[in-house]
Image: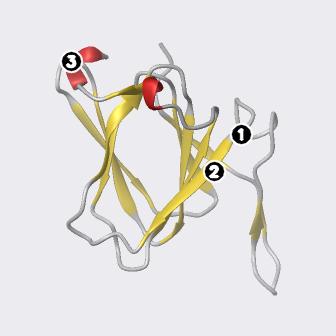
Amino acid sequence: MINPQKINFPKITDPRGNLSFIQFPDQIPFEIKRVFWTYNVPSAAIRGGHAFKTQEEIIVALSGSFDVVITNKFGEMERINLNRCNEGLHLPPNTWRHLENFSTNSVSLHLSSSVYDVDDYIRKLCDI
């Protein structure tokens, strides 16, 4: 099984501002089929709370910061803070996650390997 891992994206520095990019297959292990983002999330809110059967996902903190909490089938948790827009977290299938601890004005970008499919969601931790 592949574990969640951080991915560093190229960073081109320039006095006018930095530029980073993501392209398949150089920086990510799948073709992007869907992109969505969350924003204006209250700091005490929790997003996610599920896994996917087949979908892979990369999460990027485009602005601000938040924590991605990974839970394995034994209930053990790992907290990964995302706070750099040139870094993403790759989540393979069957990775239970939720997002919390959102800073003011944070924006989380999600790159998915498949289109939305309600049947791909795993809604109970005991089912992974």
Q: Position of residue 103 (x, y in %)?
A: 34, 73
Callout 3 touching callout 1 (CB < 8 Å): no
Q: Quadrant of the C terminus?
A: top left
Which residue does the numbered mark 2 point to in the structure image?
A: 35
Residue 96 visible, this orientation: no
- What type is the residue that disc 1 sits on? Ile
- Quarter of the image for residue 64 reads bottom left
For the residues labelled 3 and 1, the Cα–Cα distance comes to: 28 Å
Callout 2 touching callout 3 (CB < 8 Å): no
Q: In this view, does 19 lie to the left or right of 110?
A: right
Describe the element under mark 3 as helix, strand or loop.
helix
Callout 2 touching callout 1 (CB < 8 Å): yes
Q: Is residue 22 left or right of residue 87?
A: right
Residue 46 visible, this orientation: yes
For the residues labelled 2 and 1, the Cα–Cα distance comes to: 7 Å
Write the residue at 59% across / 63% down. 85
For the residues labelled 2 and 3, the Cα–Cα distance comes to: 28 Å
Write the residue at 63% across / 32% down. 114
- Quarter of the image for residue 69 reads top left
Q: Nearer the viewer, residue 55 or 82?
A: 55
- As drawn, the label of residue 101 is none
Say whether disc 2 or disc 3 marks the residue closer to the N-terminus: 2
Which residue does the numbered mark 3 point to in the structure image?
A: 126
